[in-house]
Image (cartoon, rainbow, N blue to C red):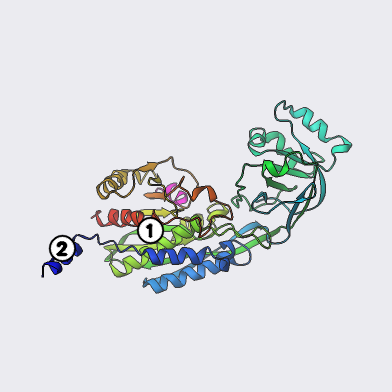
Amino acid sequence: MKKIIVILLALAVMPLHAQDLPQFKRIVRQLSSARFQGRGYARDGANKAGKYLAREYEKAGVDEVTLQPFTIDINTFCGAMEMRADGRKLKAGVDFSMREYSPGVHGEFPVYHVDTTDFDAARLLADLARPENAGAMVCCDFWFTYKHREVFSKLQKTGECNNAGLLYTWEAPIKFFKAYGEKVVDKPIVWVTPEAIAGVKRVRLNVDNAFLKDYALFNVIAKVSGERSDSCYVFTAHYDHLGNLGPRVFYPGANDNASGSAALVTLAAYYAKNRPPFDMYFVAFSGEDANLRGSTYFAEHPVVPLERIRYLFNIDMIGDDNPALYCELSDAGMPQFPRFEGLNAQKWLFSKLDRGELAANSDHYPFAVRGVPCIFLENKEGSAFPHYHTPADNIKTVRWETYEPLFRLVTGFIEGWK
């Protein structure tokens, strides 16, 4: 009898937050698998992942699931992806990758290494005008080119200089981005590690690009009806990622952002079983890695008036193990931040909530600038973070420590707000 009483008491004091770690892990594993090829904008990876999430929402017991279509223009690299430096084969995604707005490139080129210790812009342009440097790939540290972007932007344009393209050096691990891939510039731009290109005199490149015009994508919107519909809570996460770099390399994106997408499904399942006082929306965005295109479209074409959103939680990259949680808040969301801090301290969830300045770095931003109370939740600078935007962001490097305390933080915040 005593044992039964102890068990009942234990159940009575257990938190009512039904986070589902096995389900969370299963969805992360699926979304980051080769089945979806990095959830990118070619090979239909993003759209296949979106349809998979729609089915998961339905299995979670939500009241309705809708797909919100939109289109983007986007540059992709699914064809040939080969580079040799003085005859040595470099590895795509490890030794080199492509700038997102680069055209394809085919041929062999001399390499002109920029002197950054005694840099003179006029001398650089004069050197490149010499016949022996015609058709060269200009090699320079990326941050140096960024500092002198007025000069180096000329090297990207046909007619400004006779170079063939640019080699941007970047310390390993080499990153790949898609944010500004809605255009294609005149000349190829290749990211390459300093070790792979140091002292190299010639490079051979065989790289295909495909520019997709009006490529069809969609946001996945699940709803759990509450007792009232005059206000609502919104949970968001992006499910798209970087897709492919050539025929054999893809970016799994287990942390970024299979983790946030999986959290949305488990939150939807929780509220489907525990009817909330207000309507709940769970919006999985596509097009985040193409400059927040899906969330911007939703904010411009909301399925519920933005002024009805009581609070929006954007969950991105929570597959890490930093004991602190990074967050950003909109101006309208700031008055509630002390409640987050108080709940976190009371429940001993994270060592601290590390608040940063609001930035256009994830899907909360289109809502923040429109006056919606919102918070961006991310776990960064843990052991998974160095693999961000590399092929190594996979099921082997993703971490699980953040999921349960984050689940308790957001559900506890809602339960405590009457």
* Label 1 crowd (10 A; few <14 / some 14-19 / many >=20): some
Q: Is residue 154 magenta?
A: no
Question: Image quadrant of residue 14?
Answer: bottom left
Label 1 sits on what residue type? Answer: Val
Can the viewer see residue 392?
A: yes
**Which residue is more in the foreground, 318 or 70?**
318
What is the residue that sits farthest to the right in this orientation? 131
Q: Position of residue 74 (x, y in %)?
A: 64, 57
Q: Secondary structure at mark 1?
A: strand
Which mark is in front, 1 or 2? Answer: 2
Q: Is residue 36 toward the left or the right of residue 159 in the image? A: left
Q: Is residue 184 above or below residue 60?
A: above
Q: Which residue is mark 1?
A: 234
Q: Is residue 158 above or below residue 245?
A: above
Whether residues under marks 1 and 2 lie with C-beta atoms below 8 angstroms apart, the answer is no
Residue shown at 32% from the left, 69% from the top: 272
Label 2 sits on what residue type? Answer: Leu
Residue shown at 60% from the left, 50% from the top: 177
Q: Position of residue 66 (x, y in %)?
A: 45, 69
- Quadrant for the C terminus, please: bottom left
Q: Position of residue 84 (x, y in %)?
A: 76, 51
Instruction: Give me the C-alpha separation between circle 1 and circle 2.
Output: 34 Å
**Which residue is more in the foreground, 355 or 344?**
344
Please tell me which of labels 1 and 2 falls first in the chain.
Answer: 2
The mark found on residue 158 in the picture is none
Q: Is residue 188 above or below residue 42?
A: above
Q: Position of residue 174 (x, y in %)?
A: 62, 47
Q: Which portion, as a residue range, is magenta?
A: 364-371
Q: Is residue 415 toward the left or the right of residue 116 in the image? A: left
* Label 2 crowd (10 A; few <14 / some 14-19 / many >=20): few
Q: Which residue is mark 2?
A: 9
